[in-house]
Image (spheres, rainbow, N blue to C red):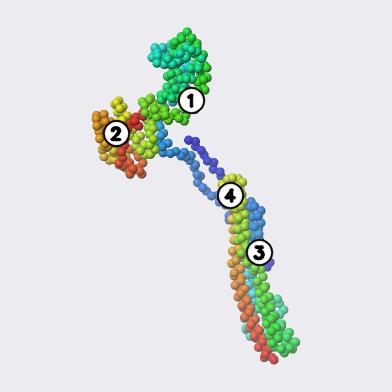
């Protein structure tokens, strides 16, 4: 009976060999591209998230402040005078656009109140859509990242697993040390994909609901303001 | 947008550095070293057919060894023991002497060689006899036997290879059977071994333990046919739970002697070591004391 000692093939793994950075450096070029792309997508989508968060907060605060001032009984002319010189967004922008149109037609001395009403409505609609467009801008990117990043990560995973199987085929060895690097980088790609996609999806949903809310408020304000203006026109005529 | 990009980029850089700091490397997975044990897979019958050996037994290859010993010194042997070796000589002389007389060439030598293979007792007697008788009958040609032996040795070598080749697969079991049945002197790998074809190792274990204490009735005529069946009941620790009994009738004194010896053997080896997890199978057991199987050594 021969005491056969089966050789324990322990791969010479140096310490720190499997940090994220080293793992990235060891990865296949395709996986590298995938990882870099996902990182860029994550950076950009977080930039959008921060930007949109600030923008929506600003819009909401401006709207509330404006509504308070608007319904406080202050004269519309004075309010227009105080707002018309700056750059306005959201509700003040609507107000300024409508007032400008109203003033122009008023100064022109036209009597046709119907056409003035129509024009004011149109101006308000345009202002609303411009405002919505401004708020909606770049939200599509979040949606894209949320839906595509997992697939891109999965592509990296498939590629990594492919390389590990090729490693098995080449080395004719199913040792885990042969398979593990490929699988590790593959899973790293998926992790990054999910890392980019999850916040993108969450904030996309949050921002779309906030966008709808903002849209509603602008619509209500536009309706109310056009009613006020048309009443004024009828009173004057 | 610039603010957002700056914040996002900074956050990512911070997080990546943090992750490389917190997870600097994969922790080495500590696995207990697996000790690999070489395992030979053998069947139960192989195990039970392993036979105990005796160290001082003579070699199992009698022909070649005997030739090597006898050939170098035929003159001294013949000088020392002529009268002792004469008795076999008359028996064998008809065979070798005419050939020797016809021509002193070594041709007759190979002929006795195949005989041991065919015969049940592979003893080197015929060869030794040939040399001795030859030397005895022609003392004047004393230098001859060595001269004859030299070409003979060469031929023996060739034949030895052939004999070994012939022997290995077929004749080995034959010889074992012969040895176990007849009263041969102990050879290596034979003494105390019971070459039964039983492959159930438990029964074989019990048989071995009993046969150690059993002195079978050897001197009796027809001892091979004295098979006695003993029925014994055992406790879990291997001791007898009741007196063993002879299974079947006894007729005649000789059979009674055999039965007595068997009963004595069963009582004397009383605590048997048997696998306790199979107690149900050996709680009530019937053992046949067959001298043909147990007489081996």
User: Is residue A170 shown to the viewer in this render?
Assistant: yes
Left or right placement of residue B289 versus residue A119 in this view: left
Q: Chain of mark 3?
A: A
What separation in Å lies between label 4 and label 2 (alpha carbons)?
67 Å
Give the mark, 1 or 2, whose residue is nearer the N terminus. 1
Along the line of sight, the residue nearer the viewer: A52 or B266: B266
Q: What residue sits right under mark 2 in the picture?
A: B228
Q: Secondary structure at mark 4?
A: helix
What separation in Å lies between label 1 and label 2 (alpha carbons)?
41 Å
- Labelled disc at residue A44: 3
Q: Secondary structure at mark 1?
A: helix
Q: Chain of mark 2?
A: B
- Labelled disc at residue B163: 1
Q: Position of residue A235 (x, y in %)?
A: 67, 91
Q: Residue at x 71, y 82 (%)?
A: A100
What separation in Å lies between label 2 and label 3 (alpha carbons)?
97 Å
Along the line of sight, the residue nearer the viewer: A234 or B84: B84
Q: Position of residue A7 (x, y in %)?
A: 54, 41
Characterize the local packing of mark 1: few (<14), some (14-19) or many (20 or more) Cα atoms within 10 angstroms: some
Left or right placement of residue B66 versus residue A220 in this view: left
What separation in Å lies between label 4 and label 3 (alpha carbons)?
33 Å
Q: Residue furthest right?
A: A108
Q: Residue at x 65, y 86 (%)?
A: A228
Q: Residue at x 47, y 29 (%)?
A: B168
- Labelled disc at residue A179: 4
Mark 4 or 3: in front is 4
């Amino acid at each position: 009976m021969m005491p056969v000692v089966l050789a324990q093939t322990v791969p010479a793994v140096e310490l720190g060999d499997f940090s994220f950075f080293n793992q990235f450096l060891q990865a296949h070029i395709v996986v590298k591209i995938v990882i870099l792309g996902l990182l860029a997508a994550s950076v950009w989508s977080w930039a959008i998230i921060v930007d949109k968060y600030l923008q929506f907060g600003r819009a909401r605060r401006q709207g509330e402040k404006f509504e308070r001032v608007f319904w406080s009984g202050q004269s519309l002319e004075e309010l227009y005078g105080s707002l018309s010189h700056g750059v306005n967004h959201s509700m003040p922008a609507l107000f300024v656009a409508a007032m400008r149109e109203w003033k122009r037609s008023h100064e022109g001395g036209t009597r046709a109140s119907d056409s003035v009403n129509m024009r004011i409505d149109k101006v308000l609609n345009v202002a609303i859509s411009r405002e919505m467009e401004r708020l909606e801008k770049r939200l599509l990117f979040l949606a894209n990242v949320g839906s595509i990043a997992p697939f891109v990560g999965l592509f990296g995973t498939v590629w990594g697993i492919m390389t590990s199987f090729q490693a098995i085929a080449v080395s004719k060895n199913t040792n885990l040390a042969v398979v593990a690097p490929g699988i590790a980088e593959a899973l790293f790609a998926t992790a990054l994909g999910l890392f980019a996609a999850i916040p993108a999806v969450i904030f996309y949903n949050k921002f779309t609901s906030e966008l709808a809310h903002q849209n509603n408020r602008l619509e209500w304000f536009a309706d109310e303001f056009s009613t006020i203006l048309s009443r004024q026109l009828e009173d004057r005529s | 947008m610039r603010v957002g990009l700056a914040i996002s980029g900074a956050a990512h850089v911070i997080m990546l550095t943090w992750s490389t700091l917190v997870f600097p490397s994969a922790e080495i997975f500590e696995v207990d070293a697996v000790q690999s044990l070489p395992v030979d897979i053998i069947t139960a019958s192989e195990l039970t057919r392993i036979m105990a050996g005796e160290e001082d037994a003579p070699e199992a290859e009698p022909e070649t060894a005997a030739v090597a010993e006898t050939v170098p010194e035929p003159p001294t042997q013949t000088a020392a023991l002529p009268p002792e070796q004469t008795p076999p000589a008359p028996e064998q002389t008809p065979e070798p002497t005419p050939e020797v007389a016809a021509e002193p060439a070594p041709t007759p030598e190979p002929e006795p060689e195949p005989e041991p293979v065919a015969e049940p007792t592979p003893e080197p007697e015929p060869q030794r006899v040939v040399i001795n008788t030859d030397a005895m009958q022609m003392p004047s040609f004393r230098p001859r036997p060595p001269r004859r032996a030299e070409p003979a040795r060469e031929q023996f070598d060739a034949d030895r290879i052939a004999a070994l080749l012939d022997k290995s697969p077929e004749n080995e079991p034959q010889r074992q059977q012969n040895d176990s049945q007849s009263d041969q002197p102990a050879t290596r790998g034979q003494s105390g071994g019971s070459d039964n074809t039983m492959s159930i190792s438990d029964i074989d274990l019990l048989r071995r333990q009993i046969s150690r204490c059993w002195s079978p009735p050897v001197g009796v005529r027809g001892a091979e046919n004295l098979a006695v069946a003993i029925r014994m009941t055992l406790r879990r620790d291997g001791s007898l739970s009741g007196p063993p009994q002879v299974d079947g009738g006894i007729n005649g004194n000789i059979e009674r002697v055999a039965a007595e010896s068997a009963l004595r053997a069963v009582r004397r080896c009383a605590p048997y070591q048997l696998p306790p997890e199979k107690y149900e199978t050996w709680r009530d057991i019937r053992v046949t004391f067959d001298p043909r199987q147990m007489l081996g050594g």
